[in-house]
Amino acid sequence: MPQIKFYKHDPIPLEMHKVKIVQQLTLLPVCERLERIRAAGFNTFQLHNADVFLDMLTDSGVNAMSDQMQSAMLRPDDAYAGSETFFRMNAKLTELFGMKHLLPAHQGRACENILAMRFVKPGNCVIMNYHFTTAKAHITRLGGRVEELVKAEGLAPRSDLPFKGDIDLEALEACIRKETPANVPFFRLEAGTNLIGGQPVSFANMKAATDICRKYGILTVMDASLLQDNLYFIKTREPGMADKPVREIARMIADLFDIIYFSGRKFGFARGGGLLVRDEALYHSMEDLVPMFEGFLTYGGMSVREMEAMTVGFDESMEMDVISQAPQFIGYCVDRLDAAGVPVITPGGGLGAHLNAMEFVPHIPQQEYPAGALAAALYLCGGIRGMERGTLSEEREPDGSERFASMELLRLAFPRRVFTLSQTEYVIDRVRWLYDHRELVGGLRFVHEPKTLRFFTGVLEAASDWPEKLAEAYAEEFGKDQ
Ligand code: F0G
């Protein structure tokens, strides 16, 4: 999606695809939404999708496929062992990233499990720019620790820094020395840093960070789940990169790492995952974990139909017209909200628009999960389902106390090629209404709190009758039927 010029109209993102198949949506009246969110324990993960108008929970496994991807799904080879589908997928990834060996896995977190099981021993420290929930859960499950060294500016909600996912290079070297290289089983760099607002990492920073790791003999791992967004930002924001084809940038990045893993629910626009390994001996040292936990080495728990679609999706992820869509829609949404005075994470990144709950509802203390409360409130105010990315998504300290997240975000994901600009305008409008009525939003507390990854299945309740009051005010503004 190049920035198409308009004659009289202000510039807006313009889709370079058209809709061929649709899913009908319903917008329940606000009183019904109140019932549904209560029944869901004020946890948007627990809503039924039929009760949701715009599902902005995630970009994972819900991106729109292209006609080319769908047609590829008609040709899979479903052999248990030696499937041609696997060899096609492996060949495409080798073509793009120059790494020969592919370990297939059913999704991204399965790759994280394999990495952690293979490399992490109790007391080890895995250094990264920022954690992702499942990556950290697997490392800590095995007695490891995570050290997050994203530059301080990366955590500033408002900024015009183009690469807020960059790691602090001095801190990285100091940390390796403090821990000693022997205690650092691998270094993980997450492209399009999810939990701090889908913020990209510059190529220059990737290069400098991996150079440091190489100096100390530390294995370098890239989480490429959000690579397609990061590629777009490197091409559009990093000096000297504008003229390079996306494929060339992808290859330059890949050449820096020993292992690249990805969630194919994001990268590849389908559902699956995989680990690419450069070194053959290293690959062999991990391969037994695939048949044990995923499936045979030529499908790794994935459907062969999805693998075929993904193989086409990898190619589409190298097309500027394709990878521009989500960042441009997100940028549009973020800029409009910012201009209206709504606290958002700036600049817009990949994955989604992120509301800064700390500023949006400053009256809600962190122990009452402001971002979780905001997620429940936005579902009430418009049927929009977002995801809490804050303290609720953290795990408690070993002594049972809360670990307060450094950012309290409500993420409104933009699954790729899914929503239209008018739907985006609706989201902006409802968020603005909620911001003008923010004092009506109150806190949440747990009724049932799972120990691990509690945000998925936790049940909460409102700390007061704020949801009823908010629903009343909404009905007064827009009518009972909306
Ligand atoms: N790494 C990153 C950066 C991710 O965003 C995700 C998933 C994973 C790994 C795990 O991959 O879901 O295929 O097991 N993120 C999803 C999200 C869940 O909604 O942000 P997975």
Image (cartoon, rainbow, N blue to C red):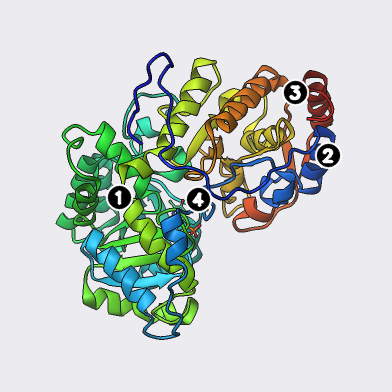
Instruction: State which mark lies toward you, 2 or 1.
Output: 1
Residue beneath the point at 49% across and 62% down: 271
* Earlier residue among tags 3 and 4: 4
Dot 4 crowding, Cα within 10 Å, few <14, some 14–19, many 20+: many
Q: Is residue 124 visible?
A: no
* Earlier residue among tags 2 and 3: 2
Q: Which residue is mark 4?
A: 63
Q: Position of residue 476 (x, y in %)?
A: 82, 20
Instruction: State which mark lies toward you, 3 or 1.
Output: 1
Identify the secondary structure beneath mark 2: helix
State the quadrant of the N terminus. top left
* Earlier residue among tags 2 and 1: 2
Instruction: State which mark lies toward you, 2 or 4.
Output: 4
Q: Position of residue 432 (x, y in %)?
A: 62, 21
Q: CA distance from mark 2 to mark 1?
A: 43 Å
Q: Which residue is mark 2?
A: 32
* Earlier residue among tags 3 and 1: 1
Identify the secondary structure beneath mark 1: loop
Relative to 89, residue 55 above or below: above
Instruction: State which mark lies toward you, 3 or 4.
Output: 4
Q: CA distance from mark 2 to mark 3?
A: 19 Å
Q: Which residue is mark 3?
A: 440
Residue type highlighted by circle 4: Asn
Q: CA distance from mark 1 to mark 4?
A: 16 Å
Residue type highlighted by circle 1: Met
Residue beneath the point at 57% across and 26% down: 425
Residue type highlighted by circle 3: Leu
Pointer 3 with pointer 1, Cβ within 8 A? no
Q: Which residue is mark 1?
A: 318
Relative to 221, residue 27 above or below: above
Q: CA distance from mark 3 to mark 1?
A: 45 Å
